[in-house]
Amino acid sequence: MSERIADFSGGITFLGMMVGGVVWGNLSDRMGRRRTLLSALGVNAVFSVIAAFMPTYGTFMMARFCSAVGIGGLLPIVFSYCSEFLCKADRSKYLSRLVIFWELGSLLVSVIAWAMLPKTGTTTVVIENKEHFSAWHQVLLVCSLPSLAAIIGFVFLPESPRYLLEAGREVEAMMVYQKIYKTNNMNNPAAHAQYQLSELELPSKRPSSHGLCSTPPPGKSVLADMTYSIEMFWNSFLQLFMQPHLPITLLLIVLWFTAAFGYYGMAVWFPEYTKLVSTWEYEAQTNVTVNATYDGTAFNTSIENVRWIDSFFKNCSFHHLTFSHVSFDNCTIEDVRFEIIKSSRTYFRNSIIKDSRFVDTDLSDQHFENCVMSNITVLSLSTGCPLDFDYNIHLGEVLRIQTFGQLAILPGAVFSALAIDKLGRVKVIGLSMFLSSVTALCIWLLYSDGVVDIYGLLFNSVFISAWNAIDIATIESYPTHLRLATDIQERAEPCQKVRHKDSMDEDQLQRLAYQGLAVAVRTLNISFIKIPRLKKKERNKQTETKF
């Protein structure tokens, strides 16, 4: 798989999540949180299983896109669903704990990958790549099992009481409150009496948004119902960009874009930079041979990380071996036999090759650059592969980075659960984003695997607090009918009034605006991630000068 295709395979997942967030999010206001979650989980589970059995790249990517559409519906709705069972006093504490399970799930995926995937390229990766149902397919299948388990669990959970009140289903909402009350007072026999409220303040009717909302269709046709649903979706979307919601909408767009860009960008960059550092170290150990002469030499053991420059080979044989990161630069190869050869990152550059035989090798035209070839015999039952697979691949290092990164987020998530409750959402967002931007400046100091590991642990631990706080701030910023996450009614207790506060107060909104400065600093610093790659170019120039 080329780098361009590999990048697209990751991008299509985010594209599916974006589509799913829009589609499922609006369906949840029509169908309810529970039904929408069950539907999104079903889509994710079914297409995750299908992706594990797809034989071609195109069908696999289509299945991954559909699976990501389901994931896109789960992420926003699950926060809304959980928050609508909580009182405002306990909301931040429990929602922060909810994020911990997200990290536990990511850690579980890393452990599964560590246990099931091959670690090196010279043996197991190459062998696994030939299998139709390889270890990669098995990992995808195992990772779909939690979605199936979640579907079973949601069957026994009630609908959100807040949604039921918004939908005018007060009786069903009261039944849910009764069940919650009985569960919370299970060990208190005196409280087992009938659940009562002296007064119930219901949510106000949904605003018409200056005439944008339409009257429900009479239900005479499916087309009329679909038209009404699309119109309701568009009306709800437009209301986000109208007063009084416009300022907070624009601010949250900037916050979420910056947060996602920073977190996922770094998550992709850490393994790539670890691979780059490993490549530097590997190239520094290259065995360089200059002006050597080989006459009648038989090579019958695999050759790795060797570079021949201005060397002469005559009447030699390379038999039943593997070339891995081998180069012949400005060499003369005369009457040489290459038999049963497997190659990886092997090239003949500016060389003269004559009177030689290539029997059952995977060396193709792409391995010969600016070479003069004459009287060459090529005998092979298979054609050359256009992909030059790198045998010097060490998945263990990448998996180690991913696992340690998820482990680092756990203490950060626990800290954020405590800090958000004590300091508030706004201060945690500002502090975490500022520290993350300062941490990004340390990217200049990354020159070894160990330093990259420590940097990844530190960045993930600091940044997760901002992510959690933005989640909760989003929940508190809109009324129920305009968003998936809502501000929650106060705890329902016997003989008490249940009240609802639709959104954050003005002081909180003004304080949240100060996070723009931290976002700007963070975005500027994240842009420095290209600097280490410039170091790579400089090193290449030094290597060329040396030889």
Image (cartoon, rainbow, N blue to C red):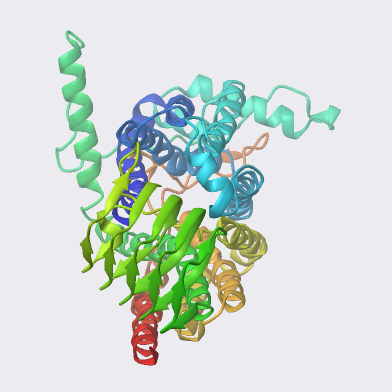
Q: Where is residue 269 in the image (x, y as percent from the top left)?
A: 43, 66
Q: In this view, does 3 lie to the left or right of 51?
A: left
Q: In this view, does 133 lie above or below 10?
A: above
Q: Which residue is drawn at 20% across and 38% down?
A: 235
Q: Which of 377 and 295 is in front in this view?
A: 295
Q: Nearer the viewer, residue 369 or 185?
A: 369
Q: Nearer the viewer, residue 401 or 458?
A: 401
Q: Where is residue 407 in the image (x, y as percent from the top left)?
A: 65, 60
Q: Position of residue 4 (x, y in %)?
A: 29, 54
Q: Residue at x 64, y 64 (%)?
A: 408
Q: Is residue 78 above or below residue 303?
A: above
Q: In which quarter of the image is residue 527?
A: bottom left
Q: In this view, does 414 lie above or below 438?
A: above
Q: In this view, does 304 lie above or below 160?
A: below
Q: Position of residue 520 (x, y in %)?
A: 33, 77
Which image quarter holds the C terminus? bottom left
Residue 425 visible in the displayed image: no
Q: Is residue 398 left or right of residue 67?
A: right
Q: Which of 521 and 237 is in front in this view?
A: 521
Residue at far top of view: 220
Q: Residue at x 69, y 31 (%)?
A: 181
